[in-house]
Amino acid sequence: MKTKQVLAASLAFLLTGAIAACSGDDDSTGSNSQKPTNCTNTISKPDLPVVTLWAWYPNTQLVVDNFNSQHNDVQVCWTNAGAGGDEYDKFQTAVTAGKGAPDVVMLEADRIPTFQAQKALVDLTDKGLNDVKANFSAGAWKDVSVGSGVYGAPIDGGPMGMIYRKDIFDKYKIKPPTTWAEYEAAAQKVKDAGGPLFGDFPANQPAYVTALLYQNGAQPFAYDPANKGEIGIKLNDDATKKVLDYWAGLVKKGLVGKQDQFTPEYISGVIGGKYATYLSAAWAPGYLQGAGVGKGADAKVWATAPMPQWDPANPVSVNWGGSAFSVTTQAKDPALAAKVAFGVYADDASLKDGWQNQIIFPLNLKVLKSPEFVDAKVGFFDGQQANKEVYVPAADAYQGMTYTPIGQYYYSAFTKQIAAINDGSKTGSAAADALQDDVAKYAKEQGFTVK
């Protein structure tokens, strides 16, 4: 117990120190009149105004250096405040304190409404949006919008496809399924022949399952801050129940696994051929390679195909993941910060480094329409032109999602219901009903009027 207390105290001290090190008190965020001094990068033109940035992608150093070398009116001071949740915790502390936030912060799209509701983000509609609006699709802009306001500059996304093992498909003489009915039939065929699981239904990835709901026409939420205090919640409609009952059936029949993803156990199974498919996003090859997949015995066995559809005559493209640069309300010069948000990771060299090294799947149409990107032969997929065949068409057709300030609670509640499906205690329909009741109750407790 004592060890845990000491560890907790140490972590609290480190977190406080990290926030202090990034606060205006020591000039690192630029939220005061002095220039920041403890940037991770070296500012090449120190006499220029400085905008502070929190971001975590592996090539951020290169991206920031590219931006600074190309600009004679502003420089970026970059701090890696942690990836994902680590950064969000620090940002939330700064928001609560009213100081210590950077001028520009990297956020995943589904996190934007939470901070927007706290008045922590700047609406970019009149901050140069029109100059860059044509660079991104309507779906990309919807993901970073809250109501009529735009609160982020898109960086990357996760148009989805079906990654599969060619060796398993060849062994059992199956073709990439184009419908969910074909997916189940192929899964049954492989199982009957003594083969591996066909896929996985992870409780710890509710955002992924939410994308599956959207593909069947579900619209889980309606939210616009202009309708003060109102939120639409529709988590147990027929479209949602159909998807959850379908996956509950696959689990019950033993056709797919129920292993949490992004875990050593799951990756071990992927490498070992435990799963014939991995329904995932365009960023998955980079993640898988980083985790050791695609090397040795499982090298050159991977391919990708479009997601199976409910109605192939009316295909629906969906997305899992994606990030943006948002301007914080603590920025000392919001217009200059917006210029950085729109300009960082927007030059050709940075975008090219991002996609060639499979760090990101860029949403900038300059890339998505580039023959070099579209026709690229992806090494992870044994030279397959995955962008042309799968991911660019999916990105082009994607219509966007509606995120809300209660998104993190929804994910937590959905995780519990997926787990109940996987342990057999609930049908998909029953889980949907329970999810509706849980999330609607929470929204009302937070002061929302549920529609």
Image (spheres, grey):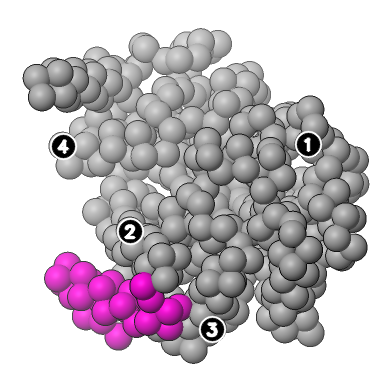
Considering depth in this image, is 161 or 428 the residue closer to the camera? 428
Mark 1 or mark 4, whichever is nearer to me = 1
Considering depth in this image, is 332 or 281 the residue closer to the camera? 281
Measure the C-alpha gap from mark 1 to mark 4. 50 Å
Measure the C-alpha gap from mark 3 to mark 2. 21 Å
Q: Secondary structure at mark 3?
A: helix
Considering depth in this image, is 83 or 350 the residue closer to the camera? 83
Q: Name the mark on residue 162.
A: none
Q: Which amino acid type is shown beneath numbered disc 2? A: Ser
Q: Position of residue 156 (x, y in %)?
A: 61, 46
Residue marked by disc 4: 97
Instruction: Please tell me which residue is depicted at 28% across the width and 72% down the height of the picture.
Output: 439
Q: Position of residue 59 (x, y in %)?
A: 61, 25
Instruction: Please tell me which residue is depicted at 47% across the width and 31% down the height of the picture.
Output: 55
Q: Which residues are magenta?
A: 425-451
Residue marked by disc 3: 242
Q: Which amino acid type is shown beneath numbered disc 3? A: Lys
Which of the two labelled residues, at mark 1 and mark 3, occupies the earlier sequence position? Answer: 3
Local crowd size for mark 4, using a 10 Å CA cut-off: few (<14), some (14–19), many (≥20): few
Q: Position of residue 63 (x, y in %)?
A: 61, 26
In the image, residue 139 lies in the stretch drawn in magenta? no
Local crowd size for mark 1, using a 10 Å CA cut-off: few (<14), some (14–19), many (≥20): some
Which of the two labelled residues, at mark 3 and mark 4, occupies the earlier sequence position? Answer: 4
Residue 159 picture quarter:
bottom right
Which image quadrant: the C terminus? bottom left
Mark 3 or mark 4, whichever is nearer to me = 3
Residue 105 appears in the picture as rendered: yes
Mark 1 or mark 3, whichever is nearer to me = 1
Q: Name the mark on residue 298.
A: 1
The vertical placement of 369 against 31, above or below, is below
